[in-house]
Image (cartoon, helix red, strand yellow):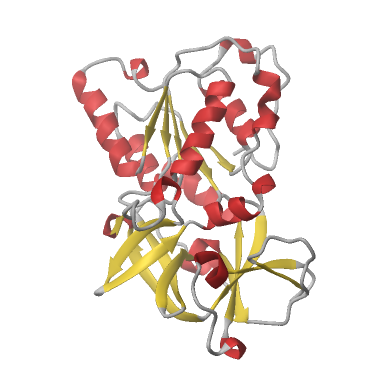
Amino acid sequence: MQNNQTNILLETGTNELEIMEFTIDGQLFGINVAKVKEIMMSSPVIPMQKAHPVIEGIFKPREQVITVIDLAKYLGLAPSNHPDKDIFIITSFNQQDFAFHVHTVVGIDRISWAMMQKPDQIIYGGEEGVATAIAQYQERLITILDFEKIVTEISPESGIQYSDLSRFSNRERMETPILVVEDSMLLAKMITESLHRSGYANITKLNNGKEAWNYLAEIKNSGDPLKAHVACVITDIEMPQMDGHRLTKLIKEDPVLKKLPVILFSSLIDEEMRKKGDQVGADDQITKPEILGLVTIVDRLTNRPDAAAEKSFAPAALSS
């Protein structure tokens, strides 16, 4: 079953998403439907020598060769009792496609981000655990997995690469205040470190859109100049409590905050998601893990004085 994403995209900025629920070893998990390209019955795969232990192999459903990841093995859960009935969830994010091997698909539900809570760090693997949120829906608890972290752990070269920032190593340190809104602690650390390496010394990190909106409201109500506390916002889209689209919409509808530049930095950025970002007023959008492009956008939107002398980097396919 292919996912016609244009039919399932929700009204922009409503703080809702649609979750595809699936099971592994009887436990209930979820994935944002925006990441799902297709679901299909599991198929034989070709094993790959010296691959990561959780990679089953590759298969070619049509014209594309896709890597299959065994989620049960990754999570340390039991294999399926009925492997002939297992499901491949074909995903698309970070400009890559993967097949995640699960046991059953339960269905799709529309859920507010406000219904999602950050998981307990002790239960779900500490600060870099595999669960990005826990959703409660109709007396069910659904564990939303951090698929970006899973892929980055299996294939580190697919994540943010600090080496891309080598050209910025001799930059002057600047105190331009940047607000990073990212629920993944791993990615927040990587983004913050990348900005530090690029000469930005004043970074505030918050965990979700609700925290960011409360922070911005406090600044606005204090009467202090806005740019003394934040000159640019970098936000993920998928976050518990309040997503990045809702945060951007609130900022751009506020008479005081609307001039604050907002960058959407998300694995979900594609043609359809770019339209949604434009609708809520995002100043720019770029897909993870394009960290060099992100830094260049920050330079432009904050009018960094030494950036004009550097060779521009702004891939046409990523600029809004």
The answer to which image quadrant residue 175 occupies is top left
Q: Quadrant of the C terminus?
A: top right
The answer to which image quadrant residue 96 occupies is bottom right
Q: Residue at the location (36% across, 47% down)? A: 246
Q: Position of residue 285 (x, y in %)?
A: 55, 40
Q: Position of residue 131 (x, y in %)?
A: 42, 58
Nearer-the-camera pick, 56 or 135: 56
Q: Position of residue 296 (x, y in %)?
A: 61, 26
Nearer-the-camera pick, 74 or 136: 74
Q: Quadrant of the N terminus?
A: bottom right
Nearer-the-camera pick, 145 or 306: 145
- Describe residue 300's horizontal placement relative to residue 217 as left or right: right
Q: Residue at the location (62% across, 44% down)? A: 159
The answer to which image quadrant residue 74 occupies is bottom right
- Describe residue 177's horizontal placement relative to residue 174 as left or right: left
- Inspect this view and state whether residue 270 appears: no
- Inspect this view and state whether residue 47 appears: yes
Q: Residue at the location (70% across, 36% down)? A: 315
Q: Residue at the location (73% across, 82% down)? A: 44
Number of marks in the image?
0
Q: Position of residue 163 (x, y in %)?
A: 69, 30
- Describe residue 233's horizontal placement relative to residue 89 as left or right: left
